[in-house]
Amino acid sequence: MPLLSPGDWFPRLTLTIPGGQRLTVPDAFAGDFASVLFYRGSWCPYCNAQLRAFQRATDSLAEAGIRVAALSVDSATETEELIARHGLTFPVGYGADAAAVAGLTGAFGNPDPVYLQSTGFVLNPAGKVVVSVYSSGAIGRLVPEDVLGLVRYLREHAPAAS
């Protein structure tokens, strides 16, 4: 499982969203920067804190042209409860096949119980990885302030179009 590095194309992942919707990343975010978050599960306090932080930053992220999506192995019911509990307004996918996602992205997994370790990606508007943050345990994850700062920096230092 190779890790995704800056400049790599992010693989196409289809997230199943509560209510029967589907969202394919990175296609759904074409033209915008995006932050894609894999979280361990609704039971993880660190994951809950991260998701709440991204929700609190929703307006700032939107103003900066940054979209967010999250994904876990949780069931539809667990995901619906998580969304309601934290008032999440960004897409949250459920039922991820941990082995398949790990194979595509290099995310670390936990064997028993099965779940994905916290992994975060910042994608550019074309769908290429700008930053990948891999955690092998409970801590070590993207925070919205860093994503905002990075995207602002990239925009300020983008080469001028001819």
Image: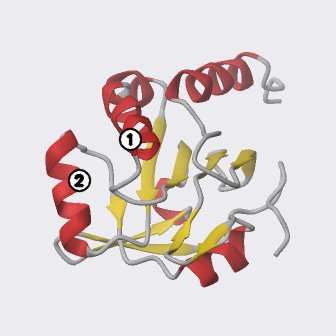
Residue drawn 29% across the image and 75% down it: 75
Which quarter shows the N terminus? bottom right
The residue under label 2 is 82
Q: Amino acid at mark 2?
A: Leu
Residue drawn 16% across the image and 45% down it: 85
Quarter of the image holding residue 124? top right
Seen from the viewer's position, the closer of residues 89 and 85 is 85
Quarter of the image holding residue 9? bottom right
Answer yes or no: do the residues labelled 1 and 2 have beta carbons within 8 Å? yes
The residue at the far front in this view is: 112
Q: Residue 117 at x, y = what percent?
A: 59, 59
- Mark 1 neighbour class, 10 Å CA radius: few under 14, some 14 to 19, many 20 or more: many
Q: Residue 14 at x, y = what percent?
A: 47, 75
Between the C-alphas of marks 1 and 2, the distance is 10 Å
The residue under label 1 is 51
Q: Residue 40 at x, y = what percent?
A: 48, 59
Residue drawn 18% across the image and 71% down it: 77
- Position of 26 compared to 76: left or right? right
